[in-house]
Image: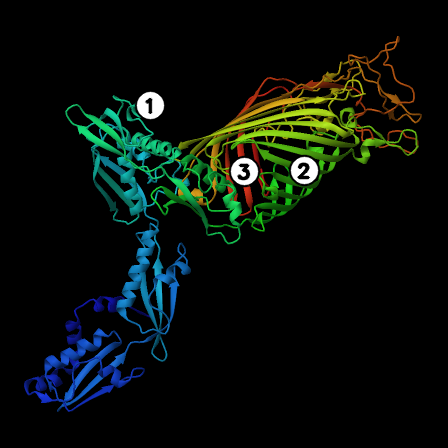
């Protein structure tokens, strides 16, 4: 392997000098000819391999019959070296017979890159002009080295070096190897600002996109590397900032980026002139439009005389006036602000000139760029029709509705083109379709559902008609579901939406109830809905749902008392009360008002909905349920999005529960709060719950009073002594405040969206159940002396009935209807065989959490559109909670929607 460095340097020397060095061996032979010029009789070429001699002779000016001199020989060398086809050339004159001896440049066999990790081959190879089977030339090598280095500079690696190497092969072939030392990424070490007096360096640096490497959150930003384009953008940002603060004469005198000697960092220095601060002087409107009175408009402007000058306010005013003119049909309204500086009193007079323009009508609407989507899918979202007067607000609303379809590019805009006459305008919807089919196969682990397998297929623009059809299947440790859905936004091409869902869901509530009291809920159902618009932003949706539900408990929670094959539920009585099959026929109605600018990622607008449901149109379930949801989004600028969301619900049973001491609303119809709706609390961790705790007797001394186990205490090896039944509530409220924090371009490309949030809510309004308290206990034995548990009889207030002799009153033939700590395993005679704790009959039930008082949590979270699916992680802290609530500090979810 031989280096090309020396050759590269040689290639940069003047051609004449190079020719002189190469021809040193023939100088003596040429000198006599120079002294006694000869007439050229013949010209021969020696050493040619690939090139024809005639081709080589065509590159020179010497011809037979010419007079040969030293200068002529030198010119031959220059001409041949200029072709860059030869590595060595010599000329010899023998009494008029000229012999040109050449050594051809080698042919490139292949191009090899070594040492490039940050920039892959597919990015570098297109920048290299050399290619296999081309003739090697040093000038092309130098040019390729320069292009590779420039590519690394664009990536912020100014210390990168490239060493070209040449490997000699047989048959005059070579391999070209570019050895790349990428070096570190050149960061911005320091930003200096000279000339600023009114604002601190930190304030001005905050207005810049470029950040230094010393910041606390610098590792999250991709803007710490040096970029000349970013430097120019920051200068514009500085000017914009000063103009918004009243400094109309501000200018950036110079902006210099200096590379440190080690080529690892840059130091940027700005020299600025702030100038004087101006206030608004006279603010006028000169209107030449007949529908606008200039003086009346000027009195309504947000700009007032005496306010500090703000260029952004002027731009916003022009935009608002343009929109206002557009609502009156002036599509091409020309509004220009005229400025007059008054240096003597530092005021700026502004006159908004509304030039005369014709009222415009929509000549036609063109839809371009759609290959799959039918024209009518786009046209029906327009809020103006052909022939209507132009209305800018209606055009913006049309853009928002088309964006919300989710079929086209995010930056979609309706453009305006002059029509066939001055008072005509053509609206063009130039769309770029994006894939609307979704196929998802994912696996993940969630703090909510543990191991997850999910698969779904959905087409949001089925057959290009705007229809949605989908199939989804989900499986996790606690839930299973399958669903088929179809939605038609415009039924029979009328503004009527329709949808239908068919589903089956299974839910294992083991993780809802912290202990042995569990149940399984299986629901098979059909849901149909239809909606009609009442106005541009308001719609009414009717729905009908038919559910067949089966609530059951595990086999170890069933007991056949009489041996007749009919098993009785011996789990928690609050769970047993919900066991059984039932049918729910539900009629619903939703009134909604939606002004969001985007349904998927809103940044402005609001939404509010009110839903009423009546169950009782047939079926075995009868209730009335109301729900309300609302949200408001604010674009704070600079990527900050603030949102407020609130919701609440209430349910009322239309059928009394025949079992005393239980709520009229069935367990599975009540509301529940916790993860994931209420961050900072565990699953169903908020609201009414029955917590059963034992009376402990650790010293086995009958004379020592038993002590009730503390609420938050778990005894090692005896954790099953405490368990809870989440009962839900008949009313709830929940509010959320969240602000989304923008990150650098690199984080945005990764799909990272961090936020700070606060949640407040509560779940309450449960009918007070009859609670059991048995501090004295009761224990009998079988004929063999084994422990035998019995159910106590209770008063209406929940206290045990006591006989005259002071012993608990026990119903006849009832030995184990309720025993929270027994495994409920029995022998052939029905006697318990494996009670967990012999003292299990000493227990107390307590109701916690049934309070309207708010719970408050705060935290930080991050949404990430990861390659494995949507990912959400939240770090939470409960500021206010109620006794009995279950909190949770860290929660995450991946592989499923949230």
Question: Which residue corresponds to mark 2?
Answer: 528
Badge count: 3
Question: Which residue corresponds to mark 3?
Answer: 872
In the rendered view, how is the structure colored? rainbow
Question: Which residue corresponds to mark 1?
Answer: 300
Q: Quadrant of residue 137?
A: bottom left
**Residue 773: percent from left, percent from top:** 77, 16
Q: Which type of secondary structure does the marked residue at label 1 adopt?
A: helix
**Residue 192: percent from left, percent from top:** 25, 37
Q: How far apart are labels 2 and 1 at the CA level?
A: 50 Å
Q: How far apart are labels 3 and 1 at the CA level?
A: 46 Å
Tags 3 and 1 touching, CB below 8 Å: no
Disc 3: CA contacts within 10 A as few (<14), some (14-19) or many (>=20): many
**Residue 211: percent from left, percent from top:** 33, 39
Left or right, 131 with respect to 444, comes to left
Of the residues under marks 2 and 1, which one precedes in the sequence?
A: 1
Disc 2: CA contacts within 10 A as few (<14), some (14-19) or many (>=20): some
Q: Which type of secondary structure does the marked residue at label 2 adopt?
A: strand
Left or right, 746 with respect to 816, comes to left
Q: Quadrant of residue 7?
A: bottom left
Of the residues under marks 2 and 3, which one precedes in the sequence?
A: 2
Of the residues under marks 3 and 1, which one precedes in the sequence?
A: 1
Q: Which quadrant of the figure contains the C terminus?
A: top right
């Amino acid at each position: 392997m031989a280096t090309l460095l020396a050759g590269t340097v040689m290639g940069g020397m003047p051609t004449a000098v190079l020719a002189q060095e190469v021809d040193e061996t023939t100088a003596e032979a040429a000198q006599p000819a120079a002294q006694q010029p000869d007439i050229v009789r013949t010209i021969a070429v020696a050493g040619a391999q690939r090139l024809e001699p005639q081709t080589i002779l065509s590159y020179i000016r010497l011809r037979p019959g010419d007079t040969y001199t030293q200068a002529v020989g030198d010119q031959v060398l220059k001409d041949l070296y200029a072709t860059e086809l030869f590595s060595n050339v010599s000329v010899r004159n023998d009494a008029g017979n000229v012999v040109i001896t050449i050594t051809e440049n080698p042919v490139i066999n292949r191009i090899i890159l070594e040492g490039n990790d940050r920039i892959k081959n597919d990015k570098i190879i297109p920048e290299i002009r050399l290619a296999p089977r081309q003739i090697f030339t040093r000038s092309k090598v130098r040019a390729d080295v320069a292009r590779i280095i420039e590519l690394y500079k664009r990536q912020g690696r100014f210390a990168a070096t490239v060493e070209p190497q040449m490997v000699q092969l047989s048959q005059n072939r070579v391999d070209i190897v570019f050895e790349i030392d990428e070096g570190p990424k050149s960061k911005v070490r320091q930003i200096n600002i000279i000339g600023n007096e009114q604002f601190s360096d930190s304030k001005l640096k905050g207005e810049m996109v470029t950040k230094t490497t010393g910041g606390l959150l610098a590792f999250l930003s991709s803007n710490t590397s040096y970029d000349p384009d970013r430097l120019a953008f920051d200068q514009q940002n500085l000017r914009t900032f000063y103009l918004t603060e009243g400094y109309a004469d501000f200018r950036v005198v110079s902006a210099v980026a200096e590379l440190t000697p080690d080529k690892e960092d840059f130091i940027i220095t700005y020299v600025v002139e702030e100038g004087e601060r101006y206030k608004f002087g006279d603010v006028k409107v000169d209107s030449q439009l007949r529908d606008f009175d200039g003086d009346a408009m000027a009195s309504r402007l947000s700009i007032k005389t005496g306010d500090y000058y703000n260029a952004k306010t002027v731009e916003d005013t022009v935009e608002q006036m343009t929109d206002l003119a557009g609502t009156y049909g002036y599509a091409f309204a020309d509004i220009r602000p005229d400025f007059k500086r008054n240096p003597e009193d530092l005021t700026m007079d502004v006159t908004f000139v509304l030039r005369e323009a014709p009222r415009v009508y929509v000549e036609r609407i063109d839809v371009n760029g759609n290959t799959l989507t039918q024209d009518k899918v786009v046209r029906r979202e327009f809020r103006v029709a052909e022939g209507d007067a132009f209305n800018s607000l209606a055009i913006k609303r049309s853009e928002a509705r088309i964006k919300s379809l989710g079929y086209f590019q995010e930056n979609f805009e309706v453009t305006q083109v002059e029509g066939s006459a001055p008072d005509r305008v053509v609206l063009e919807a130039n769309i770029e379709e994006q894939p609307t089919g979704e196929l998802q196969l994912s696996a993940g682990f969630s703090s909510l559902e543990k191991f997850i397998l999910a698969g779904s297929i959905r087409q949001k623009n089925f057959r290009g008609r705007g229809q949605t059809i989908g199939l989804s299947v989900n499986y996790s440790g606690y839930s299973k579901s399958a669903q088929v859905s179809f939605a038609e936004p415009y039924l029979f091409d009328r503004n009527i939406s329709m949808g239908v869902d068919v589903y089956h869901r299974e839910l294992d509530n083991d993780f809802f109830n912290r202990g042995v009291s569990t149940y399984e809920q299986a629901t098979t159902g059909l849901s149909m809905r239809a909606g009609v618009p009442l106005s541009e932003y308001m719609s009414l949706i009717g729905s009908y749902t038919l559910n067949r539900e089966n609530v059951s408990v595990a086999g170890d929670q069933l007991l056949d008392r009489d041996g007749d094959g009919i098993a009785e539920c011996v789990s928690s009585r609050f769970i047993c009360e919900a066991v059984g099959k039932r049918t729910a026929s539900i009629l619903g109605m939703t009134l909604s008002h939606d002004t969001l600018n985007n349904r998927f990622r809103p940044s402005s607008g609001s939404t509010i909905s009110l839903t009423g449901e009546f169950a009782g149109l047939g079926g075995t379930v009868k209730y009335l349920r109301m729900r309300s949801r609302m949200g408001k989004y604010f674009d704070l600028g600079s990527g900050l999005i603030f949102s407020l969301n609130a919701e609440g619900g209430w349910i009322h049973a239309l059928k009394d529960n025949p079992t005393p001491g239980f709520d009229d609303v069935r367990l599975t119809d009540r509301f529940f709060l916790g993860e994931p709706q209420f961050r900072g609390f565990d699953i169903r961790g908020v609201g009414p719950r029955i917590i059963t705790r034992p009376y402990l007797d650790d010293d086995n001394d009958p004379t020592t009073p038993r002590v009730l186990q503390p609420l938050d205490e778990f005894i090692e090896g005896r954790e099953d002594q405490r368990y809870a039944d989440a009962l839900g509530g008949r009313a709830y409220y929940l509010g959320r405040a969240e602000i989304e924090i923008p990150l650098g371009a690199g984080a945005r490309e990764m799909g990272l969206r961090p936020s700070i949030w606060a949640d407040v809510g509560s779940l309450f309004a449960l009918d007070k159940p009859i609670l059991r308290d048995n501090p004295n206990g009761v224990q009998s034995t079988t004929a063999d002396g084994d422990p035998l548990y019995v159910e106590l009889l209770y008063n209406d207030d929940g206290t045990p009935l006591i006989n005259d002799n002071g012993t608990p009153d026990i119903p006849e033939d009832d030995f184990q209807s309720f025993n929270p700590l027994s495994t409920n395993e029995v022998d052939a005679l029905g006697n318990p065989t494996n009670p967990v704790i012999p003292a299990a009959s000493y227990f107390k039930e307590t109701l916690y959490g049934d309070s309207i008082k708010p719970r408050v949590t705060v935290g930080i979270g991050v949404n990430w559109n990861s390659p494995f699916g949507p990912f959400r992680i939240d770090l939470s802290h409960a500021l206010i909670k109620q006794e009995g609530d279950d909190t949770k500090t860290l929660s995450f979810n991946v592989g499923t929607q949230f």
